[in-house]
């Protein structure tokens, strides 16, 4: 547009200069050369005038723009000053609110801290009293008239103690004395094993469930199945009190088969009410190498529809002691969709990648181990990073043995998503109607898992590779 305007002005100036030259040529009798010079002079004058006028116009426009910019800068400066004033006022108000909040919260925080200290002191006092009472009861049970009754360890230590004589009261025991339950009082080792065998064959192993909840919502997400033995006297014996005898008598496969059968029935009941609930079922390493494992695998294959909700759990010592046969059996279960878990951790030295490849999806660690309150072996990873390490390989960390509320608060700082312990709920028995119709199946499965008398069948000697120490609460 500017270029067109300039061209139009130039044409007009040429026409005006030409007209002036033509007029002086005709009117005043100038020669052609003189008329041309007059026309050229007029054109030059017009060009000079146009240039001066254009510059004056540009200067006027620039002056107007500068004036507008100055006014805009002044308005912006006033707005910034107003904004600064308002911001200062807001900062003063925020500081006042924070000071009031801190002044209000400090007494409450002091009271909460004092209450937390009192609760911890109370918990320590209760634990000390319980330990003292348990010690007194243990002393009463271990004090017969003629001397001290020795307990039995598991694995190779059991064989060594079986051949040794009972030590005198004044002599130090060759191995830690194991507490014998009241239900087995007055019975020797073989009698206790026989009683346990009879209870398994008669399906007198009762099933208890303890919930595993999400943190911090405390919503029940899983259950763990725990075994209790019903003695002839009617007393209930916890698994931790009779498993050592069951291992010594090679009864773990039969016990695991019975527990797995009942866990399947419980899972079916649970899935009818909630499809998002799962169940942890404890197994020993001896079951994976037992001659009856093919029958166990066949039973699990028939129930592979519930595999996502059933998790088989092994102790850390059992997983570390697994050989080729155990790993092959584990792979067979994994091929059918079943997942695995590790519990009874004594240290945090786990190979997360390897566990994931073998089908492990859960790791249960005692809360005291995560807080470094027990004598665990040194590791390269801090307990606070343990959950993140497992999570990178698709493994969930479950903190167990949670007894007091303060543990939950500390576990949240460690990014632990699941918890289990007496704080949430103690183990509760499964209702009898939930286990109806299991007696015949249990007898059949137990018969197939019974060890053959005499020489060990082919592959049966591999059961001796399973390590003792499979504890179940």
Image (cartoon, helix red, strand yellow):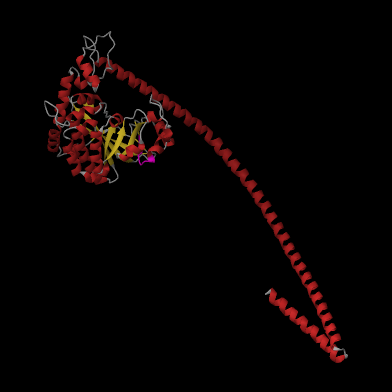
Q: In percent of the image, x 22 and y 46: which residue is there?
A: 305
Q: In percent of the image, x 82 and y 78: which residue is there?
A: 44
Question: Which residues make up the magenta segment?
Answer: 391-398
Query: Where residue 186 sits in the image (x, y, percent)?
Result: 18, 17
Residue positioned most to the top: 170
The front one of 19 and 392 is 19
Query: Where residue 237 sits in the image (x, y, percent)?
Result: 22, 26
Q: In percent of the image, x 79 and y 70: which residue is there?
A: 56
Q: In percent of the image, x 36 and y 37: which residue is there?
A: 352
Q: Is residue 392 magenta?
A: yes
Query: Where residue 57 sits in the image (x, y, percent)?
Result: 77, 70
> For the C terminus, which image quadrant?
top left
Query: Where residue 335 sits in the image (x, y, percent)?
Result: 24, 43
Report the side of 74 relative to 238 (left or right).
right
The front one of 364 and 321 is 321
Quadrant for residue 318, please give it: top left
> For the N terminus, which image quadrant?
bottom right
The front one of 334 and 430 is 334
Quadrant for residue 385, please give it: top left
Report the side of 151 relative to 383 (left or right).
left
Q: Is residue 280 magenta?
A: no
Examine the rendered structure and indicate whether residue 119 appears above or below residue 360.
Answer: above
């Amino acid at each position: 547009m500017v270029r067109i305007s300039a061209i139009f002005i130039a044409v007009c100036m040429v026409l005006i200069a030409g007209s002036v030259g033509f007029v002086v040529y005709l009117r005043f009798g100038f020669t052609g050369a003189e008329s041309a010079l007059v026309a050229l002079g007029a054109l030059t004058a017009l060009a000079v005038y146009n240039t001066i006028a254009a510059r004056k116009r540009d200067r006027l426009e620039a002056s107007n723009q500068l004036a507008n910019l100055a006014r805009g800068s002044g308005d912006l400066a006033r707005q910034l000053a107003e904004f600064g004033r308002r911001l200062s006022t807001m900062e003063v108000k925020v500081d006042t609110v924070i000071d009031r909040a801190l002044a209000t919260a400090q007494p409450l925080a002091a009271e909460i801290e004092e209450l937390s200290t009192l609760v911890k002191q109370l918990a320590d006092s209760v634990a000390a009293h319980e330990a003292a009472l348990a010690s007194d009861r243990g002393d009463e049970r271990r004090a017969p008239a003629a001397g001290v009754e020795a307990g039995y360890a598991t694995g190779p230590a059991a064989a060594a103690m079986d051949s040794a004589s009972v030590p005198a009261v004044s002599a130090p025991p060759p191995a830690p004395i194991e507490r014998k339950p009241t239900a087995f009082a007055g019975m020797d080792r073989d009698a206790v094993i026989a009683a346990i065998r009879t209870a398994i064959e008669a399906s007198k192993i009762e099933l208890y469930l303890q919930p595993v909840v999400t943190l911090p919502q405390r919503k029940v997400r899983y259950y763990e199945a725990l075994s209790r033995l019903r003695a002839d006297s009617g007393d209930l014996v916890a698994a931790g009190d009779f498993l050592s005898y069951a291992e010594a008598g090679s009864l773990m496969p039969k016990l695991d088969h019975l527990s797995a059968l009942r866990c399947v029935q419980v899972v079916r009941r649970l899935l009818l009410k909630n499809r998002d609930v799962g169940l942890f079922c404890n197994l020993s390493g001896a079951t994976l190498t037992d001659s009856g494992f093919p029958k166990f695998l066949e039973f699990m294959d028939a129930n592979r529809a519930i595999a996502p909700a059933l998790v088989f759990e092994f102790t850390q010592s059992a997983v570390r002691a697994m050989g080729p046969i155990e790993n092959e059996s584990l792979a067979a279960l994994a091929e059918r969709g079943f997942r695995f878990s590790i519990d009874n951790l004594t240290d945090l030295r786990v190979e997360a990648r390897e566990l994931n490849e073998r089908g492990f999806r859960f790791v249960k660690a005692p809360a005291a181990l995560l807080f470094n309150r027990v004598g665990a072996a040194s590791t390269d990873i801090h307990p606070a990073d343990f959950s993140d390490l497992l999570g990178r390989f698709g493994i969930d960390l479950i903190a167990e043995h949670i007894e007091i509320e303060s543990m939950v608060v500390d576990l949240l700082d460690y990014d632990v998503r699941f918890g289990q312990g007496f704080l949430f709920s103690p183990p509760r028995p499964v209702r009898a109607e939930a286990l109806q119709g299991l007696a015949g199946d249990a007898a059949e499965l137990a018969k197939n898992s019974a060890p053959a008398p005499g020489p060990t069948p082919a592959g049966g000697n591999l059961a001796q590779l399973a390590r003792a120490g499979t504890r179940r609460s």
